[in-house]
């Protein structure tokens, strides 16, 4: 399937289409990020963050034909930002050839969902829900169901 069709499907919420885009772009994206940040582990983090940002913002992309340019601009911007933050860090990890690049693609959609769940857990609980759960626990303790 061509990239434009995949992007349009992604914009409609098709996770499989997004997964396919990730698989197609991940190696080149990792190489691009590595050239900017000079650390394999940091490059992997940057690529993951770029795909997460892409997943969240792909519906705003007006022209699916420009997807790859749009994505790489986002990736380069993130890479430069991270590189400037880590300017003083010394990389002890050489990257001699593409064989050292990871071949396994992280499931970005799962990562987005996990981050959203973490945010939900970190938010203060709703007082009504806490009260309801407390009563359910007390009722369960009285009947021996706990």
Image (spheres, rainbow, N blue to C red):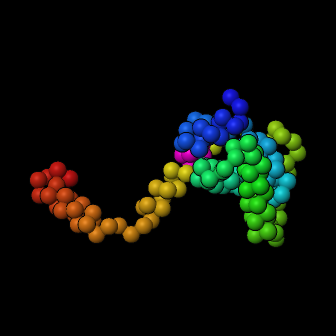
Q: Please name the residue shown 83% across and 57% down the image.
A: 36
Asked if residue 78 lies left or right of residue 117, the reply is right
Q: What residue occupies the far front of the structure in this picture? A: 62
Q: Please name the residue shown 81% across and 59% down the image.
A: 37
Q: Please name the residue shown 77% across and 55% down the image.
A: 73
Q: Please name the residue shown 69% across and 43% down the image.
A: 64
| Number of numbered discs | 0
Residue 43 visible in image: no
> Residue 127 location in percent, x, y?
28, 69
Residue 114 visible in image: yes
Q: Quadrant of residue 99?
A: top right
- 121 vs 2: above or below: below
> Residue 55 location in percent, x, y?
61, 49
Asked if residue 110 lies left or right of residue 100, the reply is left
Q: Quadrant of residue 5?
A: top right
Q: Is residue 57 magenta?
A: no
Classified by dominant secondary structure, the portion drawn in magenta counts as helix
Q: What residue occupies the far top of the structure in this picture? A: 1
Asked if residue 42 lies left or right of residue 127, the reply is right
Please give the range of residues in magenta.
107-111
The residue nearer to you, when weighing 77 against 63, is 63
Q: Quadrant of residue 142?
A: bottom left
Q: What residue occupies the far right of the structure in this picture? A: 96
């Amino acid at each position: 399937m061509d990239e434009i069709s995949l992007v349009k499907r992604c914009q409609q919420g098709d996770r499989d289409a997004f997964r396919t885009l990730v698989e197609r772009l991940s190696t080149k994206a990792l190489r691009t990020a590595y050239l900017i940040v000079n650390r394999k582990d940091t490059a992997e983090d940057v690529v993951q963050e770029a795909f997460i940002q892409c997943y969240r913002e792909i519906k705003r992309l007006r022209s699916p034909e420009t997807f790859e340019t749009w994505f790489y601009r986002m990736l380069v911007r993130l890479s430069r930002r991270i590189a400037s933050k880590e300017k003083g860090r010394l990389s002890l990890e050489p990257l001699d050839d593409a064989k050292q690049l990871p071949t396994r693609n992280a499931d970005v959609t799962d990562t987005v969902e996990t981050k959203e769940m973490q945010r939900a857990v970190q938010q203060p609980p709703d007082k009504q829900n806490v009260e309801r759960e407390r009563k359910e626990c007390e009722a369960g303790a009285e009947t021996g169901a706990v």
